[in-house]
Amino acid sequence: MGRDAEPTACVIDSQSVKADAVVGADSRGFDGGKNINGRKRHVVVDTLGLLLGVMVTAADVGDRTAAQVLLHQVADAHHRLALVWADGGYTGSLVEHCLAAFALVLAIVKRSDDHKGFVVLPKRWIVERLFAHLMRSRRLARDFERRTNSAEAMIYWSMTLLMTRRLARSPRGRA
């Protein structure tokens, strides 16, 4: 796509999904904000929407708590990262923690109170597009996996399919 292979900016977000009956109580939780009993997928994507990291937890795990672990993994793997865009759920002490521990600037993209209904937010639509791609995979419409690392592997598999479709469609992939 004419960009450097190593990302310098990324977007983080989470998605709560319902869990199937096979998911044990130890990895299941209740997300009160979304009224979902299941698991939460925490993802980090680059500015092209390609997956940099994923972590699956119980739905009652907070975004800030999971973000500390996930951003640590992503920052170790991608040393040039300097900027992370996030929603309002990542405010508070996480902003200072990212700057001190990982040298990452955590920029919060907030929704304006002036608008009613759906509004496309700058940079945040990138991660929402990834969630839409994941939900198109029938296996990921609900969490059917017994273990969280199997659920993460399913997300990586779905992302691999998406990336190969993009490569097959691009003129660079044909050369």
Image: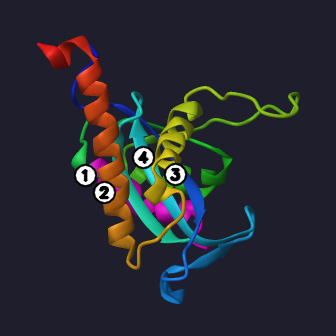
- What residue is pinned by disc 1? 76
- What residue is pinned by disc 2? 73
Q: Is 64 placed left or right of 32 in the picture?
A: left
Q: Where does the magenta region start and end?
A: 60-75
Q: Are marks 1 and 2 in contact (CB under 8 Å)?
A: yes
Magenta stretch contains residue 103: no
Q: Quadrant of residue 108?
A: top right
Q: Are marks 2 and 3 in contact (CB under 8 Å)?
A: no
Sequence order check, earlier mark of 2 and 4 = 4
* Amino acid under disc 4: Val
- The span from disc 1 to disc 4 (Cα, nearest Å) is 13 Å
Q: Where in the figure is residue 83, as x and y percent of width and height?
A: 43, 35
Q: Which mark is residue 44?
A: 4
Could you say whether the residue bearing mark 4 is in a helix, strand or loop? strand
* Amino acid under disc 2: Gln
Q: Residues within 10 Å of mark 4 (few under 14, many from 20)?
A: many
Could you say whether the residue bearing mark 3 is in a helix, strand or loop? helix
- Mark 1 vs mark 3, foreground winner is 1
* Amino acid under disc 1: Asp
Sequence order check, earlier mark of 3 and 4 = 4
Could you say whether the residue bearing mark 2 is in a helix, strand or loop? helix
Q: Is 111 placed left or right of 150 in the picture?
A: right
Q: Where in the figure is residue 66, as x and y percent of width and height?
A: 48, 64
Magenta stretch contains residue 72: yes
Sequence order check, earlier mark of 1 and 3 = 1
Q: How many marks?
A: 4
Q: Residue at x 19, y 14 (%)?
A: 172
- The span from disc 1 to disc 3 (Cα, nearest Å) is 18 Å
Q: Main secondary structure of the magenta part?
A: helix
